[in-house]
Amino acid sequence: MARKQWREMGAAMLPLGGLFSAVRIPARLVHAVAGTAVPADVDEFLEHALDGGPVICVLHGGRRYYALVPGSMPRTWHDAAEEWRAVEVDCLGRDALLGMPPVTRVDHDPATWASYWSVPMAAAGELCAPLSVARLVAAGVHRIREEEEEVDADA
């Protein structure tokens, strides 16, 4: 089914919450902590920050990143997720679907496709460590708040 969806739609809609879940992170948060919005540089930053854990970048509808994590993560992060929703971070698990690009789509090309593997999956079952994702989100939230305070101080 996935191969057919990749061929016909360019992405396969896979259910979350079983083998893996996803943490949706807005681009502005990732760019703030990465210190850049240049796609290749952000991809390299994410690979190091998440120890090679897989990340999908979705370009349409406002750029977002999806860090793939163990399937049980959304349940264990319920409290943190409530606070993160204020900055548009969400933990997606059971009852959610994620559009997965083909595993060969590893380059940023907004003219050709709407999503790609910002950090490709190294092997089946290798996911982002939840603690690494939490650190990334916390650093991004902190940096965005610093930037907002600087703007308020300048005003």
Image: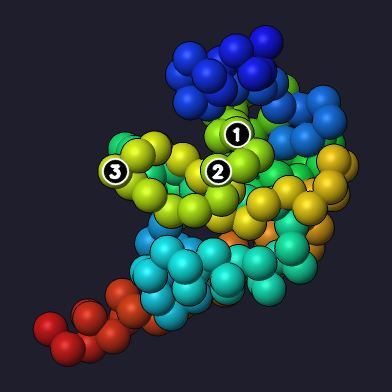
Q: Quadrant of residue 15?
A: top right
Spatial CA distance of label 1 from label 2 is: 6 Å
Name the colouring of the figure.
rainbow
Give me the residue at 68% from left, 73% from top. Answer: 48
Contact check, label 3 and label 1, Cβ < 8 Å: no
How crowded is the residue under tag 1: few (<14 C-alpha within 10 Å), some, or many (20+)?
some
Quadrant (top left/top right/bottom left/bottom right) for the C terminus: bottom left
What element does badge 1 sit on?
loop
- Name the kind of residue labelled 2 in the image: Arg
Query: In the rendering, at what x and y percent does residue 53 appear?
Result: 74, 57
Q: Mark 1 points at which residue?
A: 102
Please give the residue where the numbered disc 2 appears in the rendered image: 105
Q: Which residue is found at the position 37% from the left and 69% from the top?
A: 37
Q: Nearer the viewer, residue 11 or 155?
A: 11
Disc on res. 111: 3
- From what the image shows, is residue 125 above or below residue 128? above
